[in-house]
Image (tube, grey):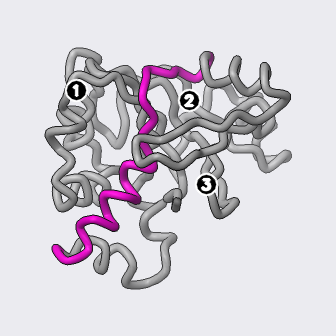
Amino acid sequence: MKLKLLTAGVCAAALFTGVAVADHGPTTVGGANMLPERNIIENAVNSDDHETLVAAVQAAELVDVLQGEGPFTVFAPTDDAFAKLPDGIVDTLLEPENQEQLQTVLTYHVVPGNMNRDALWEKVMEKDGAVALQTVQGEYLTVTRNGNNLMVMDAQGNGANMTVVDVAQANGVIHVIDSVLMP
């Protein structure tokens, strides 16, 4: 898992506590510049860490939606996150006959609105450590604290660490996560 660490002290603390350390406000993701004047798709297609996600969005015919006005908060799984799924799942989801199921999985990673890390943190603290957010898909994700960072939990109770946060987009914000979420 690639993480940009803010300081050596944070790095050491993360190694000893097992807490994922998120990078705040990056200008690059997956080796590519993320320009705030571009929309979610225009930026995502340039990230070497999100090739599977981009292929899935294209197969699900969601490109136009994520290029739309928004705003959207996207929890974007990396290629490594997709690789954690059981063998064959990604290939199966990418088959044309499974487009509806793929759309369900992908829209479960999108929340209406433009919620940066500070806004999410505030909501979590207001709700005593966990807040449920309704996704575009219709079901809920739960955002919780993970040390000084945030974690997103799916309906199955599986968690994804937010490893890179606050990637500004013209139509919202992306938070990179290290696992795929399932409704």
Q: Could you classify mark 2 by the number of other residues whose Cα lies within 10 Å: few (under 14), some (14-19), or many (20 or more)?
A: some
Q: Residue at x 49, y 80 (%)?
A: 86
Residue 84 screen position, x and y as percent: 51, 70
Circle 3 sits in a helix, a strand or a loop, which is it?
loop
| Eye-nearest disc, 3 or 1 | 3
Of labels 3 and 1, earlier in sequence is: 1
Residue tagged by mark 1?
39
Circle 2 sits in a helix, a strand or a loop, which is it?
strand
- Please identify the dominant SS of the magenta region: helix
Q: Which residue is nearer to you in this view: 104 or 174?
A: 104
| Eye-nearest disc, 1 or 2 | 1
- In the rendered image, the residue lying farthest to the bottom is 87
Q: Which residues are magenta?
A: 96-118
Whole-Å distance between the Cαs marked 3 and 2?
Answer: 22 Å
Mark number for residue 23?
Answer: 2
- In the rendered image, the residue lying farthest to the front is 138
Q: Which residue is nearer to you in this view: 91 or 45?
A: 91
Q: Could you classify mark 1 by the number of other residues whose Cα lies within 10 Å: few (under 14), some (14-19), or many (20 or more)?
A: many
Whole-Å distance between the Cαs marked 3 and 1?
Answer: 25 Å
| Eye-nearest disc, 3 or 2 | 3
